[in-house]
């Protein structure tokens, strides 16, 4: 049975994509659950970093569940509904105020690549594989799913992925800007854990603001005077005062998201 499993370890939440026997292929129930999980976690102040990974060691997610394509999206109305759910799940990841980190081992294909692209950081083991060879299946990527990949890697890389349908190695994916880091298989868990800890040591409100302003600046529109003033909202926070005090007192800051 497919699922999106949640585990909490202090300030770190881990969402595991699980579809046994199908290399964690994402079905419609998983897309819906992923959207709901992300919405729930976004409201939990105690959570400061979210790791997204695949169950087992063979795949992050090997695309969408193709069996549903002949049962749940055979008409235009079904297809529009289905892919609206997919796009909503991806948007929930992108909009999440907490930093998101994709832990990638094995196949990261199609919908799996879209999920990874929606995350803030992507760390993969060296044998991992990336792509979206849907040109060989006769269907195109829904624009609402393509947007995050396009924003991450740019049109040249997205065209290469979609027009050639070639599967990329982890090193190729890194060189093309799809990945944050590539590490040996045996180092993946430790590297992801260390990255999550570094995120958690920072001020959580600041992490959310950095994500917000990066997204805003990417629109290409100039900031209004109100927005410029809003960028200094940290001046009124306890965490700002705590961060400065800890620096001058030469101690570790204790941030409270206030």
Image (cartoon, grey):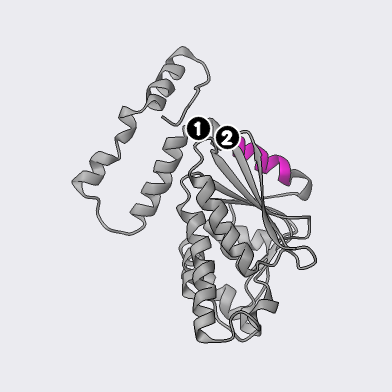
| Quarter of the view holding residue 7 | top right
Say whether marks 1 and 2 touch (CB < 8 Å). yes
Q: Identify the main secondary structure in magenta.
A: helix
Mark 2, secondary structure of its residue: helix
**Label 2 crowd (10 A; few <14 / some 14-19 / many >=20):** few
| Residue 16 belongs to the span the image colors magenta | no
Residue 198 marker: 2
Could you tell me residue 41's position as x and y percent? 54, 46
Between residue 257 and residue 57, name the one nearer to us: 257
Instruction: Tell me, yes or no, if residue 42 can be seen here.
Output: yes
Could you tell me residue 242's position as x and y percent? 42, 21
Report the residue at 33% width, 59% height from top: 219
Between residue 41 and residue 167, name the one nearer to us: 41
- Residue lying furthest top in this view? 249
| Quarter of the view holding residue 47 | top right
Residue 72 marker: none
Could you tell me residue 33's position as x and y percent? 60, 59
Between residue 4 and residue 253, name the one nearer to us: 4
Screen quadrant of the C terminus: top left
Residue 202 marker: 1
Question: In the rendered structure, which segment of residues is drawn in magenta?
Answer: 188-198
Instruction: Tell me, yes or no, if residue 177 can be seen here.
Output: no
Between residue 32 and residue 236, name the one nearer to us: 32
- Residue lying furthest left in this view? 225
**Label 1 crowd (10 A; few <14 / some 14-19 / many >=20):** some
Could you tell me residue 96's position as x and y percent? 48, 50
């Amino acid at each position: 049975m497919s699922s999106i499993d949640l585990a909490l370890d202090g300030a770190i939440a881990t969402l595991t994509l699980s579809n046994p026997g199908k290399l964690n292929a994402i079905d419609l129930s998983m897309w819906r659950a992923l959207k709901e999980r992300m919405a729930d976690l976004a409201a939990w102040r105690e959570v400061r970093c979210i790791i997204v990974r695949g169950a087992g060691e063979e795949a992050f997610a090997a695309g969408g569940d193709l069996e549903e394509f002949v049962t749940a999206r055979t008409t235009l109305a079904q297809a529009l509904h289905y892919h609206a759910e997919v796009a909503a799940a991806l948007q929930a990841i992108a909009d999440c105020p907490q930093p998101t980190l994709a832990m990638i081992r094995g196949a990261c294909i199609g919908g799996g690549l879209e999920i990874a692209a929606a995350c803030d950081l992507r760390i993969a083991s060296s044998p991992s594989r990336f792509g979206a060879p849907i040109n060989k299946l006769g269907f195109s990527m829904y624009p609402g799913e393509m947007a995050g990949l396009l924003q991450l890697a740019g049109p040249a890389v997205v065209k290469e992925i979609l027009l050639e349908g070639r599967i990329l190695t982890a090193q190729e994916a890194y060189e093309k800007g799809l990945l944050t880091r590539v590490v040996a298989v045996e180092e993946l868990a430790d590297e992801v854990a260390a990255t999550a800890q570094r995120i958690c040591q920072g001020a959580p409100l600041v992490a959310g603001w950095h994500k917000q302003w990066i997204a805003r600046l990417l629109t290409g529109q100039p900031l209004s005077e109100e927005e410029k003033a809003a960028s200094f909202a940290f001046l009124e926070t306890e965490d700002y005062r705590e961060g400065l005090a800890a620096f001058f007192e030469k101690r570790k800051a204790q941030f409270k998201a206030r």
